[in-house]
């Protein structure tokens, strides 16, 4: 008996650094998994690797039609959709607001925010048909405050918080819980993009050494929290936000002890 036997879970961005960790863990815990992503080659390979109880669907979260197809895939392959993880997300190339291209703004908001909205919209009827379910939205610690040169990303992740709380209110009476996770810096391809004001990657600029837990987060750190929130153990938790950052938001540990 596993925690997610007979449950079907759709993970967007399901082939990425964190998404593939989530998919593997849900599958190992007995779930049927639907891997949604724009990267077909990686999605097919992951579904093949997992074998039974795993399917890939090409899902562009900005596209309403592909959301309908993903939900249909889940229900026709496995009978129900029980859990949606809105994990797909992109970063903007760092730039001050004044020189941020409006096309970049639209793209980042389109994937991170509108994609999450479209996902809730498409999944809610299916979760209701399953007599209840769970939605977890992946935001970021950058959605909890300002970060210079990352306006599109910050704004998109900040807005996901309000969307989560509103969805929790609208869907709670149907037995559907909706929560947000705010990861800190997690070691995935995402942090190999260039950092603001630097030609090197975020991972090369960012050192976790001063922080309370002096290491980068691993995708599995986020996965463990996600599985808890998606499980029956979290049945009284909705509209909530969970920071998982190793103490990053607390500030440097040494500075605090010296103060
Ligand atoms: N890595 C970090 O430090 C960090 C920190 C905080 C939050 N996050 C968030 O965690 C989530 C997962 O990021 P990750 O670290 O695994 O990055 P990643 O780049 O490894 O994975 C992102 C995935 O999203 C997919 N994707 C991109 N556009 C898509 C679209 N339009 N439709 C469907 N899928 C699409 C990509 O193909 C990729 O598989 C993102 O929402 C990201 O904003 C990451």
Image (cartoon, rainbow, N blue to C red):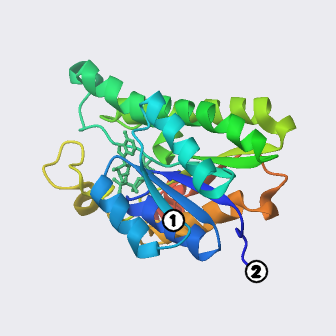
User: In the rendered image, is residue 127 in sight?
Assistant: yes
In percent of width and height, residue 214 lies at 44, 72
Which is more foreground, mark 1 or mark 2?
1
User: In the rendered image, is residue 216 in sight?
Assistant: no
Picture layout, residue 193 above or below residue 254: above
Q: Quadrant of the N terminus?
A: bottom right
Q: CA distance from mark 1 to mark 2?
A: 18 Å
Q: Earlier in the sequence, mark 1 or mark 2?
A: 2
Q: Are marks 1 and 2 in contact (CB under 8 Å)?
A: no
Q: Write the residue at 33% across / 67% down.
A: 45
Q: How many marks on residues?
A: 2
Element under disc 1: strand
Q: Answer with left or right where residue 78 lies relative to residue 108.
A: right
For disc 1, the neighbor class at 10 Å (few under 14, some 14 to 19, many from 20) is many
Residue 54 bears which disc, if any?
Answer: 1
In percent of width and height, residue 198 lies at 16, 48
Q: Write the residue at 40% across / 74% down.
A: 49
In percent of width and height, residue 67 lies at 50, 36
Q: Which residue is mark 2?
A: 1
């Amino acid at each position: 008996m596993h925690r997610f036997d007979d449950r079907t879970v759709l993970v967007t961005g399901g082939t990425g650094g964190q998404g593939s960790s989530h998919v593997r863990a849900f599958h190992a815990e007995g779930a049927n998994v639907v891997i949604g992503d724009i990267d077909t080659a990686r999605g097919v390979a992951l579904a093949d690797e997992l074998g039974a109880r795993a399917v890939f669907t090409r899902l562009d979260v900005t596209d309403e039609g592909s959301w309908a197809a993903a939900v249909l895939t889940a229900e026709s392959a496995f009978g129900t959709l029980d859990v949606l993880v809105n994990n797909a997300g992109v970063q903007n190339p760092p730039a001050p607001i004044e020189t941020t291209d409006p096309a970049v703004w639209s793209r980042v908001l389109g994937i991170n925010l509108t994609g999450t909205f479209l996902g809730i919209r498409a999944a809610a009827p299916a979760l209701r048909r399953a007599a209840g379910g769970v939605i977890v939205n992946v935001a970021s610690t950058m959605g909890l405050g300002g970060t210079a040169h990352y306006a599109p990303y910050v704004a998109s992740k900040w807005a996901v918080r309000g969307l989560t709380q509103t969805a929790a209110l609208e869907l709670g009476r149907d037995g559907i819980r909706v929560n947000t996770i705010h990861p800190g810096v997690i070691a995935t391809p995402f942090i190999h993009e260039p950092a603001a004001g630097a030609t090197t990657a975020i991972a090369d600029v960012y050192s976790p050494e001063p922080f309370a837990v002096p290491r980068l987060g691993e995708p599995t750190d986020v996965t463990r929290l996600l599985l808890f929130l998606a499980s029956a153990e979290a049945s009284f938790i909705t509209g909530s936000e969970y920071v998982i950052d190793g103490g990053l938001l607390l500030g440097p540990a040494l500075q605090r002890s010296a103060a």
